[in-house]
Image: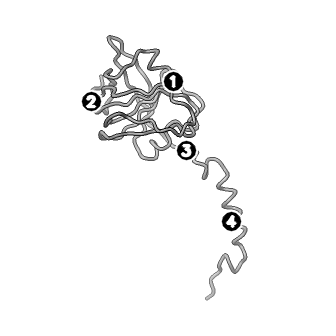
Amino acid sequence: MQFLSFRRLNLLPTLGILLLILGMMPGIAGGQEEVHFEHDTLSIVVDDMVHHFTVEIAETRQQRARGLMFRRKMAPDAGMLFDYRRPKPVAMWMKNTYIPLDMLFIRADGSVESIRERAVPHSLASISSKDKVRAVLELNAGTAARLGIRPGDLVRHRIFGNAD
């Protein structure tokens, strides 16, 4: 019995060209494959005001790696909540992110640990929490200033055990 091989059929160069073409196609090997996110709501308590947001939940490694990359816009009352499941130091970047963002680093009890306002799109600079956090909430740039969100304010969501 004789087995066919790519070498014997002289298909190796053709296979290499095909792989190169596929690698150049966005969505297949270009990092833009579809990633699905659960939608939920959360609120942020600032002084006596409660601000409501619709968020996508990034809880798997694949979802957190993708985040808001390649998105061109986001509704004013929307965001993405990155759940790391347990407190740890967190660092993020803006690679392939087109939307300027505010990043709220959130402790396990839901309190805002720190805020990075107006993160620059496409930047490779590391944006880190100051201490261990359970989650990061990304909102449109300017939202923290517009709503007066500060460290110590409370984010209410089921992952913090403090949802309404």
Say which quadrant the N terminus sits in.
Answer: bottom right
- Give the image quarter of residue 134: top left
CA–CA distance between discs 2 and 3? 32 Å
Percent coordinates x, y for residue 164 in the rendering: 30, 22
Q: Earlier in the sequence, mark 2 or mark 3?
A: 3
Label number found at residue 17: none
CA–CA distance between discs 2 and 1? 24 Å
Q: Which callout, 3 or 4, points to the residue nearer the camera?
A: 4
- Give the image quarter of residue 5: bottom right
Marks 2,3: beta carbons within 8 A: no
Marks 2,4: beta carbons within 8 A: no
Amino acid type assigned to the residue bearing label 2 in the image: Asp
Percent coordinates x, y for residue 47 in the rendering: 32, 12
Q: Residue at x 40, y 28 (%)?
A: 104
Q: Which residue, given by chain and number where applicable, does mark 1 sit on? A: 141
Amino acid type assigned to the residue bearing label 1 in the image: Ala
Percent coordinates x, y for residue 22 in the rendering: 66, 56
Amino acid type assigned to the residue bearing label 4 in the image: Gly
SS assignment at label 4:
helix
Amino acid type assigned to the residue bearing label 3 in the image: Glu
Q: Earlier in the sequence, mark 2 or mark 1?
A: 2
CA–CA distance between discs 3 and 1? 25 Å
